[in-house]
């Protein structure tokens, strides 16, 4: 690991300025669980680390019935999993956060850092996308907001411009009939990174399903929504046959990656299985 300067700005605005001073040589550090690993493996060699882990303004979890949920970018995964407001109003999010990586990462890693690292085989992005989350970004030119699907661009690549950082994540308030379920498939019990993840959110109505967001993660370059399957759930009564058809669409409409952890064919099959089980759970239907 090369020597580096360690800078501690007094505010998010100052952090933006420091990042912009030498954008090619600077990296933002919060919990550091991913960045320090990359530096030890010499995948990254920044000359300057801009530390924001001490900025209390970027912490905290707040819920308002009209405004929804605000999650500070420096919120740790364990804090998210244990927050009463998250457990009460966004149980899918709390369940996901309780399973991220391992206890060490959950108690040190931050939600904002996880999103900025943009690892395709991680849990939060797909779950947040299904919940229609947006990231609040601060930069030299002020503040902007992006949907998660616009924020995640490619392998380990986000839409952050030089000098920008995430300050918080926002979720809309839940409505009556909202239900969500996050499921993941691990290649082995010893692994902590999912090979497949499916985040499913639906809004139940008297006629079945009036809205749906279905997201496949870990098996694709970035978490991927599947509009045809969402439309099917809203168009047909929620029967076992409908859910099976939706699972087939989900598996067929993604472009799974193939690597040393699993082939594209295997990933597609596991997406189909996990999706069918997730939808059956959401609609309280027994699988045949």
Image (cartoon, rainbow, N blue to C red):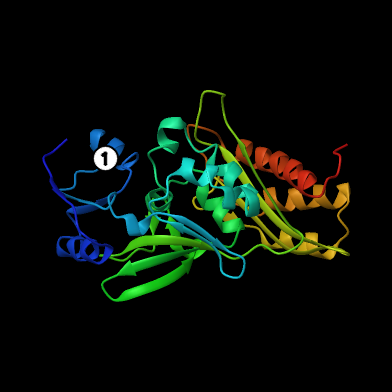
Residue 13, percent across and down? 25, 67
- Residue at image position (28%, 76%) is 141
Q: Position of residue 48 (x, y in %)?
A: 16, 50
- Reading the image, the residue beneath label 1 is 43
| Res 223 seen here | no
Residue 263 visible at all: yes
Q: Residue at x 53, y 47 (%)?
A: 83
Choose top left, top right, bottom left or bottom right for residue 89.
bottom right
Say whether residue 212 is left or right of residue 48. Answer: right
Looking at this view, is 181 or 58 the one in front? 58
User: Viewed as shown, does residue 44 lie left or right of 172?
Assistant: left
Q: Nearer the viewer, residue 43 or 10?
A: 10
Outermost bottom residue = 141
Identify the secondary structure beneath mark 1. Answer: loop
Q: Alpha-carbon neighbours of circle 1 within 10 Å: few (<14), some, or many (≥20)?
A: few
Q: Quadrant of the N terminus?
A: top left
Q: Residue at x 85, y 53 (%)?
A: 242
* Residue lying at 61% horizontally and 57% vertically, measured from the top left: 130
- Residue 261: image location, x then y, percent: 50, 32
Is residue 260 shown above or below 128? above
Q: Position of residue 154 (x, y in %)?
A: 43, 55
Asked where in the image residue 163 lies, by quadrant, the reply is bottom left
């Amino acid at each position: 690991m090369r020597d580096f300067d360690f800078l501690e700005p007094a505010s998010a605005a100052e952090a933006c300025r420091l990042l912009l001073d030498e954008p090619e040589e600077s990296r933002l550090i919060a919990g550091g669980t991913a960045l320090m690993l990359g530096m030890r493996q010499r995948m990254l060699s920044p000359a300057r680390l801009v530390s924001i882990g001490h900025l209390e303004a970027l912490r905290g979890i707040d819920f308002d019935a009209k405004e929804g949920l605000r999650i500070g970018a420096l919120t740790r995964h364990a804090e998210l999993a244990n927050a009463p407001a998250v457990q009460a109003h966004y149980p899918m999010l709390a369940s996901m956060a309780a399973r991220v990586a391992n206890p060490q990462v959950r108690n040190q890693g931050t939600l904002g850092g996880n999103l900025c690292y943009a690892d395709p085989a991680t849990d939060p992005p797909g779950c947040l996308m299904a919940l229609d989350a947006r990231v609040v970004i601060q930069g030299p030119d002020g503040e902007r907001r992006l949907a998660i699907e616009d924020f995640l661009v490619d392998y380990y690549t986000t839409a952050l411009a030089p000098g920008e950082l995430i300050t918080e994540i926002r979720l809309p308030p839940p409505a009556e009939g909202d239900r969500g379920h996050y499921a993941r498939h691990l290649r082995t019990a010893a692994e902590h990174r999912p090979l497949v993840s499916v985040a499913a959110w639906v809004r139940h109505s008297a006629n079945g399903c009036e809205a749906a967001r279905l997201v496949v993660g870990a098996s694709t370059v970035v978490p991927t929504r599947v509009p045809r399957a969402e439309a099917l759930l809203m168009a047909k009564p929620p029967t076992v046959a409908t859910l099976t058809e939706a699972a087939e669409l989900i598996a067929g409409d993604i472009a799974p990656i193939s690597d040393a952890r699993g082939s594209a064919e295997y990933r597609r099959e596991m997406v189909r299985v996990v999706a069918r089980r997730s939808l059956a759970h959401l609609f309280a239907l027994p699988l045949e």
